[in-house]
Image (cartoon, grey):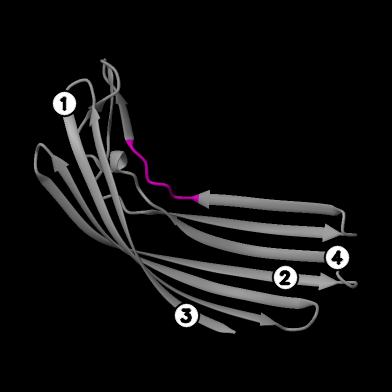
Amino acid sequence: TLHIKANLSYNWDYNDFKDLSDKYKIEQKQLITTISASYSKRWSNVFSTNISAVEYLIKRRLSIEPENEVYSKFFSVFCPNINLSLSFKGGLHNLNLSWYGYPHFVGVNQLNPHRIWSSSTSYYVGNPETAPGYAQSVSADYSFLGDYFVSLRYDHSNMPGQTFLTTD
């Protein structure tokens, strides 16, 4: 079975915070459009597959006061997903293999290009050009005799971060 779906969402994130030196108001608006397609097939009573992909189209607008700075950027994140299931001996043994991808969205503090002092000797700086991160998860699950379950999983991400600096 083939399914194709489109979704439109709007995300507004506002942060008004004080550090030790200044007060910033940061507003992030994101228009996120997702286009997904999935294909599922049961090959027999034993084997089935599910393959899907999602494309995230992200239009970000970041405004920072009191400087009246505006940053606008477009991002595209492609996330494929694959799931294979194998069931045998009347369902007493089941094996599930999956690879899953998904985006990580960036918070407003990670986008602020100004120094935010967390103490008299430490501050952090964000980057308004930071793209959304991407994570992947690979897993293998095996269940047997209806009562026992073994699972292996590996996660990897390229999460965007902040620069944290300490002054002397």
* Residue 127 on the magenta span: no
Marked residue nearer the N-terminal end (3 or 2): 3
Q: In this view, does 108 lie above or below 166?
A: below
- To which residue does mark 2 refer? 85
Task: Give the residue at x 80% y 80%.
Answer: 45
Q: Look at label 2 and name its amino acid.
A: Ser
Q: In which quarter of the image is the N terminus?
A: bottom right
Q: Quadrant of the C terminus?
A: top left
Q: Which of 166 and 85 is in front in this view?
A: 85
Marked residue nearer the N-terminal end (4 or 2): 2
Secondary structure under badge 2?
A: strand
Q: Position of residue 155 (x, y in %)?
A: 57, 50
Between the C-alphas of marks 4 and 2, the distance is 11 Å
- To which residue does mark 1 refer? 22
- To which residue does mark 3 refer? 4
Between the C-alphas of marks 3 and 2, the distance is 22 Å
**Mark 2 and mark 4 in contact (Cβ < 8 Å)?**
no
Q: Look at label 3 and name its amino acid.
A: Ile
Q: Which of marks 3 and 4 is in front?
A: 3
Between the C-alphas of marks 1 and 4, the distance is 61 Å
Secondary structure under badge 3?
A: strand
Q: Nearer the viewer, residue 60 or 9?
A: 9
Marked residue nearer the N-terminal end (3 or 1): 3
Task: Give the residue at x 36% y 54%.
Answer: 132
Marked residue nearer the N-terminal end (1 or 2): 1
Q: Nearer the viewer, residue 38 or 139?
A: 38
- To which residue does mark 4 refer? 93
